[in-house]
Amino acid sequence: MQYHYIVGQTPLDEEEKRGLIPSLITRGELDEWEEENILIAREWILRRQTLSRLDLINEEMLINLHKRMFDNVWRWAGRYRQSDKNIGVRYVEIPQELHVLLDDARYWMEHQTFSIPELATRLHHRLVKIHLFPNGNGRHARLIADALVAKHEESPLTWGGGDLSRPEELRQRYIASLRAADCGDYGALVAFATAY
Ligand SMILES: Nc1ncnc2c1ncn2[C@@H]1O[C@H](COP(=O)(O)OP(=O)(O)O)[C@@H](O)[C@H]1O
Ligand SMILES: [Mg+2]
């Protein structure tokens, strides 16, 4: 299996590659398996009426969601990184950093610090910045943001209105706006995520 990485992606280490469940050959096939798996998780989280807003800002939920998104593809689905990457905090700091983020996000919600689309976008950025998992962080953190916005019956986030898995102009803009958010400037990312 040949892995090709595009801008803003985290390469897998050998141990993580061995976690691949299907015996696939091409990158295209891997993308398809992941996409099918993710669709099942998307249906699950967007349709579950019984989930409350705060249920979505919760460690178990984040782990469960990643597991559901990738459990047919990666044996480490729903398990935190066990190695350091070019993006993200040191792996030993993941649980602590996540708790800080979830406390912040609950505070934002309780005090209505931001509009819901902005709250979801900030949560998204902080999640990918921590980089909980070996892979799938971008898609996972977009889906939880989508679920949060849906729960509040706001218009769906658009994330640039195209396919962010291709290394083209749209993804470049997405990554550039994440980098601006790394420096505390969320304007471009919120605009990117919400523009119609
Ligand atoms: N400078 C950055 N700051 C914050 N997040 C970033 C940065 N660069 C990349 N990312 C995020 O990391 C994601 C890539 O991580 P990865 O685990 O491979 O997710 P996926 O497999 O879903 O694309 C990107 O989609 C983006 O969300
Ligand atoms: Mg990836």
Image (tube, rainbow, N blue to C red):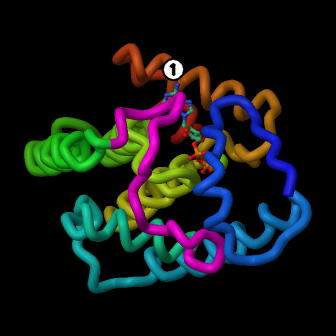
Question: Three-letter amino acid code at disc 1?
Answer: Arg
Depth order, front residue of 63/50 = 63
Give percent across and percent down for residue 108.
17, 42
Residue 170 image-quadrant placement = top right
Give the residue drawn at x 29%, y 45%: 94
Find out if the beta carbon at label 1 lies less than 8 Å from the nearest ligand 1 atom: yes
Give percent across and percent down for residue 145.
42, 54
Relative to 98, is 26 above or below?
Answer: below
Relative to 189, is 96 above or below?
Answer: below
* Residue 178 in the figure: left or right of residue 28: left
The reply to whether the magenta stretch includes residue 109 is no
> Where is mark 1, residue-wise?
179
Depth order, front residue of 26/34 = 26
Instruction: Write the start and end of the magenta stretch as one range.
Output: 71-91
* Residue 189 in the figure: left or right of residue 22: left
Magenta stretch, main secondary structure, is loop
Give the residue drawn at x 86%, y 50%: 2
